[in-house]
Amino acid sequence: MSQRPPVKDWATDWDHLHPQWVEDPFPIWDELRQRCPIAHTDRFMGVYLPTRYEDVRAVAYDTDSFSSRRVVVRESPPPRVPAPPITSDPPDHRAARMVLLPPFTPDAMKKIEPRARALANELLDKFIERGSCDAAVEYAQEIPVRVIAHMLGLPEGDGDLYRKWIHQILEVGITDNSVLMQAVGEMTHYFMGHVHERMEKPGDDLISYLLKAEFKGQPMGEEYVAGALRLLLIAGIDTTWSGIGSCIWHLAKNPQDRRRLVAEPALMPTAIEELLRAYAPVTMAREVKQETEINGCTFKPGQMVLLSFPAANRDPAMFEDADKVVIDRKENRHAAFGLGIHRCVGSNLARLELTVAVEELLKRIPEFGLDGPVTWSEGTVRGPRRLPIKF
């Protein structure tokens, strides 16, 4: 990411690419919640930032005033590259979403779980004797890449290619449209090749399923399928590997939580929900369609809203001890998977991958700690990019 001009005032000149935000955004959100619950910046051609759960929820549910046609805040808007249903608004959104729901049901995930667990152990086998590893690069980033490739019927060995595209689209592409469009073009070409293969020889995979699916009573068509595949690859990989990495980072820093999970494995589902709340990886965006007011703030058409689900999850008005990780938290209506009609289609898959990754790691490496500086991602998906641990 290029050198950023200094932030003068987080309430009126915030920048989510600023090193201070990238390293530790939580104090910034806490300050804004008290001073100016809905901040604004003239950077990125004008963006609003709600930090309270109530305000984030209000924007997410108001599809009349806020559009999903642009879901990432960038320096300048690129040509529109649809990725339904995430970039769809009503009435098209529901039909596009319904196409993607069946492959991600809880029952469908049960079929994926054995492969996910085997994969986690294959990865652990590669470094367990070494006594150290980069838990982000060698473990967290590999699991979602290989699982989604398995579901789509793509080569699991193409992971480096997927990682490159994700970095170009969600990080470098925020400030460089040429890099963004190059990555989108490469992805489309890649997926079109596999789509044409399945058109000739269908298989038992997600690409073949999408080609057979209907949208508004018509076959989806290869370009629509390619858009859905771009969404599944981008939204289904970076978000989850960031979540897995954050879980491992927390457990490396907090041995009491790690040891409790080893001793009380039944606590894992509750702990995963709390780690999702505390370290929610995903921030989305909306484009203001029509002037509207929320919590005393007037949103102007054409500007963007950075819809920070992670900030909403740290709102003390919604969560007791919001700034603390309480792995046995009983009530936890977090927004890690979004709010409103765009709530994450792949939430069941994400939960499965996080649970499997943490469970298998703790079974075989119950004691570990940080082994050097941690590097965090830049952009709207937050998670460790470098996470050295020793054990």
Image (cartoon, rainbow, N blue to C red):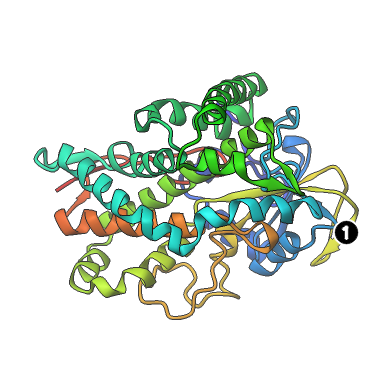
State the residue in front, 231 or 8: 231
Relative placement, left or right, of 289 versus 132 is right
**Quarter-of-image position of residue 279:** bottom left
Relative placement, left or right, of 177 versus 373 is right
Residue 276 visible within the image: yes
Residue 278 percent coordinates (x, y): 46, 62
Q: Name above or below for residue 341 compared with residue 209.
A: below
State the residue in front, 125 or 91: 91
Relative placement, left or right, of 235 versus 64 is left
Q: Look at 58% across and 35% down and name the residue there.
A: 230
State the residue in front, 230 or 319: 230
Residue extending farthest to the bottom is 330
Residue 30 percent coordinates (x, y): 57, 62
How many numbered circles does the render carry? 1
Q: Secondary structure at mark 1?
A: strand
Residue 2 percent coordinates (x, y): 56, 25
- The residue wearing badge 1 is 292
Q: Name above or below for residue 386 compared with residue 178.
A: below
Residue 16 visible within the image: no
Q: Look at 52% across and 31% down and name the residue there.
A: 198
Mark 1: give few (<14), some (14-19) or many (20+) Cα within 10 Å: some
**Quarter-of-image position of residue 77:** top right
Residue 331 percent coordinates (x, y): 48, 79
Q: Look at 20% across and 67% down and name the residue there.
A: 262
Residue extending farthest to the right is 291
